[in-house]
Image (cartoon, rainbow, N blue to C red):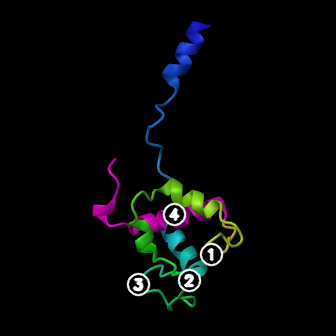
């Protein structure tokens, strides 16, 4: 019994271990964001039109989201995966994105991060 417990403890990763980043297709994420998000957000500076909903509340630009402290792939994925129909204190609807679409949008958003804002590894 002690051998089983010891081998399980040895195989378990440390609680604070870095998890593998969520990988997605940045091009597909950009395309999805331009299709689904530009009604409210500035997805990229040269998007085809300005957001239709200017606020308040003021939807943040994707680059601003990418450069927020403590923003990581997992937190963005969680945010997009758990959106309510109309979240409290927000007018952002749940777009019912597939898990692949969420990963792609998250990858695109994180690709906008300034190099100086990237978290330490």
Q: Position of residue 96 (x, y in %)?
A: 70, 68
| Residue closest to the eye, 97 or 28 | 97
Magenta-drawn stretch contains 80: no
Instruction: Kindly identify which numbered label has been placed on residue 106.
Output: 4
Earlier residue among tags 4 and 1: 1
Residue at x 32%, y 50% (from the top left corner): 120
- Measure the C-alpha gap from mark 4 to mark 1: 16 Å
In primary-sequence order, the first of circles 2 and 4 is 2
- Gap between marks 3 and 4 measured at Cα: 18 Å
The crowding category of the residue bearing disc 2, from other C-alpha atoms within 10 Å (few below 14, some 14 to 19, many at least 20), is some
Q: Is residue 103 visible?
A: yes
- The Cα atoms of the two marked residues, 1 and 2, are separated by 8 Å
For residue 40, the mark is 2
In depth, the one of 89 and 111 nearer the eye is 89
Coordinates of residue 27 in the picture (x, y in percent): 49, 70
Residue 45 circle label: 3
Query: Is the C-beta separation of discs 3 and 2 under 8 Å?
Result: no
Which quadrant is home to the N terminus?
top right
User: Which quadrant holds residue 16?
Assistant: top left
Labels 3 and 4: the sequence-earlier one: 3
Which element is circle 4 on? helix
Q: Earlier in the sequence, mark 3 or mark 1?
A: 3
Q: Nearer the viewer, mark 3 or mark 1?
A: 1
Residue extending furthest front?
A: 89
Q: Position of residue 82 (x, y in %)?
A: 65, 60
For the view shown, which residue lies furthest in the left direction? 116
Q: Earlier in the sequence, mark 3 or mark 2?
A: 2
* Quadrant assignment, res 105: bottom right
**Which residue is denoted by mark 1 in the rendering?**
92
Magenta span covers which residues? 98-121
Q: What kind of element bears circle 2?
A: loop
């Amino acid at each position: 019994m002690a051998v089983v417990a010891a081998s399980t403890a040895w195989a378990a990763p440390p609680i604070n271990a870095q998890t593998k980043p969520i990988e997605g297709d940045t091009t597909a994420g950009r395309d999805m964001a331009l299709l689904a998000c530009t009604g409210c957000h500035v997805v990229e500076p040269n998007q085809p039109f300005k957001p239709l909903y200017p606020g308040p509340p003021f939807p943040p630009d994707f680059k601003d989201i990418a450069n927020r402290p403590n923003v990581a792939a997992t937190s963005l994925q969680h945010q997009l995966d758990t959106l309510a129909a109309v979240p409290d204190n927000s007018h952002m609807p749940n777009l019912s994105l597939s898990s692949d679409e969420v990963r792609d949008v998250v990858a695109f958003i994180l690709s906008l991060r300034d190099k100086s804002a990237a978290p330490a590894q």
